[in-house]
Amino acid sequence: MAGRACSCGLGHLNEDNARFLLLAALIALYLLGGAAVFSALERAHERQAKQRWEERLANFSRGHNLSRDELRGFLRHYEEATRAGIRVDHVRPRWDFTGAFYFVGTVVSTIGFGMTTPATVGGKIFLIFYGLFGCASTILFFNLFLERLITVIAYIMKSCYQRQLRRRGTLPQDSLKDPGKCKVDSMAGWKPSVYYVMLILCTASVLLSCCASALYTPMEGWSYLDSLYFCFVAFSTIGFGDLVSSQNAQYDSQGLYRFANFVFILLGVCCIYSLFNVISILIKQSVNWILRKLDGRCFQQCQRRLLRSRRNVVMPGNMQNRCNISIDTDGVMESDTDGRRLSGEIISMKDFLAANKVSMAALQNQLSEAANGYPHQASMQPRESEFSAGVGALAIMNNRLAETSGDR
């Protein structure tokens, strides 16, 4: 039976809804702040560009004795030609095989530059089905790439850590030959830091962007800053389309340049996608920290009111056990969580933090296991291996499906 409503509004939220609502509010504030900054930076430039265009249009109309309406009509025809891929300067064909291959690459990678779009009805219908399966397959590839990348990083970090232990004389020389011994020696409690993983991925992304920019600057005639800007927009799959590589008709060493462009974009998208997944874990921990700060006087007062209203009511067993869970708990009892999910009872903020504290530790566990070369033990609780079925969005879906089938 539900008690009296909590005045702060947190009492009726389960662990997923509380995090979801807080993250939605933070994203909304982030969007509002970003809109304010970009408006302040770009609005004046937009007005100046519009003023210069109106002056040039008026001068051209007077100089060639053309009416403004006729001139604007002609410019609309040019805009239609631009959308079809026609440019004033000579550029590569958009729909030959190489151009079409570049297009489908931007589709399945979700970059979508927008400089090439299907104009026929058949092309638009085919794109819907092609993109549906292509994007799903590429996202799966990115997740599998991330898992293998984490395995390599974890192995390298473990090797470096073992070398440090050998210098100190605390690690036996034969420990590398038998990974099982790591459980009982000084390596037992070691886990790679997620912050180091993020630093490695960030460094790799920056180096890749700098190398790609050094290639794009002379080949495309862009400034180095514009090249860096293009790298981030392309690698993060934002894909504005204001700058697009490999669009000129001819290049020096054209075949080699287009191959290098393909490799840079592929590796860049994989690295930035992996970096985004790791950063999302840190964002989740930040959300949990904010929720912990919110667990103050307001929530304590609501709990006191709830206890007063239930003073003469028999408390369910899982509600009594819940009071013994602390914020420092690494795991959450499955029976407690399942009971709460089915009954819809009010949860405490400490429960929420205990249930969601596993994000950082879960990735650390996977890093440690990847380095040591052995999987989770069967006796471990499912919530302690949150990323055992994958990393990132794929892991979240797998875990949610597992929870759903477990409730049944």
Image (cartoon, rainbow, N blue to C red):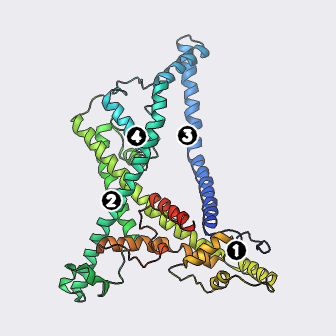
Question: Which residue is at a point 56% across and 74% down the rendered structure image?
Answer: 355
> What residue is shown with label 3?
45
Q: Quadrant of residue 18?
A: bottom right
| Circle 1 SS class | loop
Precedes in sequence: disc 3 or disc 1: 3
Disc 3 vs disc 1: Cβ atoms closer than 8 Å? no
* Residue wearing tag 1: 346
Question: In the image as oriented, which residue stretches furthest toward the top?
Answer: 65
Q: Counting residues from the N terminus, which is met first, the one under dot 4 or under dot 3? A: 3
Sooner in the amino-acid sequence: mark 2 or mark 3:
3
Q: Tell us which disc is closer to us: 4 or 3.
A: 4
Closer to the chain start, of discs 4 and 1, is 4
Residue receiving disc 2: 204
Label 4 sits on what residue type? Thr
Element type where label 3 sits in the image: helix
Amino acid type at image mark 1? Ile
Tag shown at residue 106: 4
User: How many angstroms separate mark 2 from mark 1 (CA)?
Assistant: 45 Å
Q: How crowded is mark 1: few (under 14 residues within 10 Å), some or many (20 or more)?
A: many
Q: What residue type is labelled 2?
A: Ala
